Image (tube, rainbow, N blue to C red):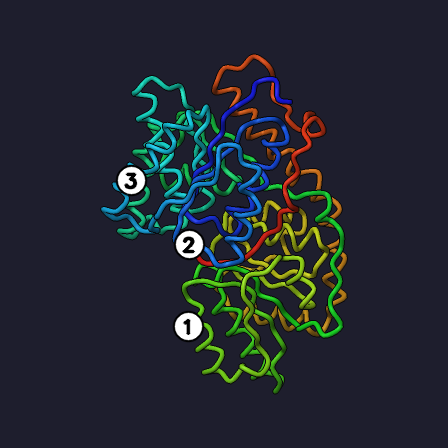
Amino acid sequence: MATNKLRIVHCVRSPIGGIFRHIRDLAECQIKAGHDVGLICDSTTGSAYDNRLLDDLRPHMSLGVERFPMKRQLSLGDLKAAYSLYRHVRDLNPDILHGHGAKGGAYSRIIGTILRIKGSDTKRIYTPHGGSLHYDPNRMEGRIYHALEHGLITLSDGLIFVSDYEYSAFETKVTSPHVPVRIVYNGLKASEFTPVKSNSDAADFLFIGMLRNLKGTDLFIEALNNIRLARGTAPSAAIVGEGPDETRYRAMVERLGLQDTVRFYGAMPSRDAFAMAKTVVVPSRAEAMPYIVLEAIAAQRPLIATRVGGIPEIFGKHVDRLIEPGRVGRLTQAMTEALHHPETMLPATESLSSTLAETFSTDLMSDRVTSLYHELLGNPVACNDSQNLEDNSTVLPEPTSFIAKAK
């Protein structure tokens, strides 16, 4: 069991996608290390698939899984939600209140500050996961969100970034933090490094991501059409995910006459999706440290991805294989090359997979995060919770990434 047992509450708006995968893995490691862990999230977000994952998590969270309505955009309703959240968190008496994403980070730091005014020593931790850092600082919406982030830094005890890129973006768009900072990469489990083979009826390409403009789903569809125009036949493709722009993308497929070769699927485990296609395509316009790229590489799937966010940090010496974001011509070229010469993509994938486990590990991720908790609390014993994993028999169902409704 953990030498210094902590009461940890994670707060996130939408329990979906990579951000929830991160929280789930972190919570599992913290529970195994003997800590009491809870989760607060939105009650209006998530498909049946998302809700099943929450139900799997609930029995193992000693501080509970509670859901409150949290809108994505700022609104007067935030005041009512914040009051409900405050009363719930107050009764949990956490040592650590860890907010994830812009809205979760705002709620957790404001509530944590009120608790401190009332005598608590709750530490307020924030991990952006991209969030407001994706906004253009030259536009009004970006200026508003970045100003709010700047104000909230004074209510923070520590910041955790999931990539060097994210930390740099925070310094550039918001401020240079005056509180302790850790850069902690997202982690994978050893079991995820088992290769995934394509099904016999696999499509040529797979897009897996939330169906929103930020993820480049429209670029993927346009590239499929460009290939069709160039060679006379369209490649087959699977689109896995849900999101606010799904209707628009379905209409785009119909308008371009690709309905016979492009199929839409809902949320599903990423490794199941990987088997459905020969090449995975991640044409994102912006990212932080995407799990789907890590998972595709660990599964040794041929991968086309853009040079955004923390993706270059994953690719390392193979960074020249990444393509520039937003350039449908370059995306079309890369996908065409994958169709004609798929064998050229395998060596880089195998090389990346063999080195990924050392840096992108769930145990390492948990150790670095939880050691920051202890540091801020002034606990004298150094944290290495991974050493305690066998001391606790609690085992959550195997976590898996999924794609669901937009954050």
Instruction: Decide which of tag 3 and tag 2 comes sooner along the chain.
Output: 2
* Amino acid at circle 3: Ala
Q: Nearer the viewer, residue 398 or 366?
A: 398
* x and y, in percent, of residue 402 in the image: 56, 55
Between circles 3 and 2, the one closer to the viewer is: 2
Q: Amino acid at mark 1?
A: Arg
Viewer-proximal residue among 62 and 161: 62
Q: Is residue 327 above or below residue 53?
A: below
Q: Amino acid at mark 2?
A: Thr
* Image quadrant assignment for residue 89: top left
Residue at 35% x, 48% y is 69
Which residue is the site of mark 1? 248
> In this orientation, which residue lies closer to the viewer: 375 or 396?
396
Q: Quadrant of the N terminus?
A: top right
- Element carrying mark 2: loop
> Residues at badges 3 and 2 in contact (C-beta under 8 Å)?
no
Query: x and y percent of residue 299 in the render?
Result: 71, 54
Q: Which residue is mark 2?
A: 45
| 115 over 396 or under it: above or below | above
Mark 3 packing: few (<14 Cα in 10 Å), some, or many (20+)?
A: some
The residue most toward the front is: 59
Residue at the disc numbered 3: 147
Q: CA distance from mark 1 to mark 2?
A: 20 Å
Question: What residue do we see at 54% from left, 53% from top?
Answer: 52
